[in-house]
């Protein structure tokens, strides 16, 4: 992960002077300045979302199998989930909402990955059961 001082403060990520730093575009906000270069595995996992969403909807936790990350990273694979992730990557906000109706966990996992750079072990989705 490559992030600037501002994003480090905002996300409470390490910003010690001895960390590797170089000038470039921050992966989070895109600003070009001296950024910290820290392996994503050293950053804290995104914290779990509360059980009830802002809209007051019931939420549930869905475990994300490790095979999803393989499918997500393998754009040449032709199995269903790999193709689904290809579609999710290319979707605009409107289509993403449509995809989330059928595949909420996949879409949520993608959003977590977009925000944190880490594929999640589990995601919180609306409990429609
Ligand atoms: Zn930044």
Image (cartoon, helix red, strand yellow):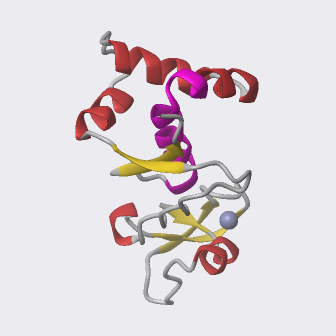
**Ligand 1 is located in which of the four quadrants?**
bottom right
Residue 7 falls left or right of residue 65: right
Q: Nearer the viewer, residue 15 or 70?
A: 70
Magenta residues: mostly which secondary structure?
A: helix
Residue nearest the observer in this picture, 93 or 1: 93
Instruction: Name the residue rendered at 64%, 81% in the picture.
Output: 9
Residue drawn where x is 65% and y is 77% of the image: 5
Q: Is residue 120 visible?
A: no
Q: Is residue 104 on the magenta stretch?
A: yes
Quick one: 3 or 55, which is closer to the camera?
55
Determine whether 14 is above or below 67 in the image: below
Residue at the image position 35 percent from the left and 71 percent from the top: 42
Q: Which segment did they paint magenta? A: 100-116
Q: Is residue 4 visible?
A: yes
Residue 41: percent from left, percent from top: 33, 64
Q: Residue at x 62, y 60 (%)?
A: 24
Give the vertical position of 43 relative to 115 (above or below): below
Q: Horizontal and vertical percent for residue 118?
A: 42, 53
């Amino acid at each position: 992960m490559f992030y600037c001082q501002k994003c480090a403060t905002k996300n409470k990520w390490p910003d010690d002077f001895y960390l590797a730093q170089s000038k470039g575009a921050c992966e989070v906000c895109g600003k070009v300045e001296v950024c910290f270069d820290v392996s994503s595995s050293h950053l804290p996992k995104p914290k779990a979302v509360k059980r009830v969403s802002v809209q007051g909807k019931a939420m549930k936790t869905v475990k994300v199998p490790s095979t999803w990350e393989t499918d997500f990273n393998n754009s040449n694979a032709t199995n269903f989930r790999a193709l689904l992730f290809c579609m999710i990557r290319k979707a605009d906000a409107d289509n993403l909402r449509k995809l989330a109706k059928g595949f909420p966990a996949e879409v949520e996992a993608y959003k977590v990955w977009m925000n944190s750079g880490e594929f999640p072990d589990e995601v919180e989705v609306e409990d429609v059961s």
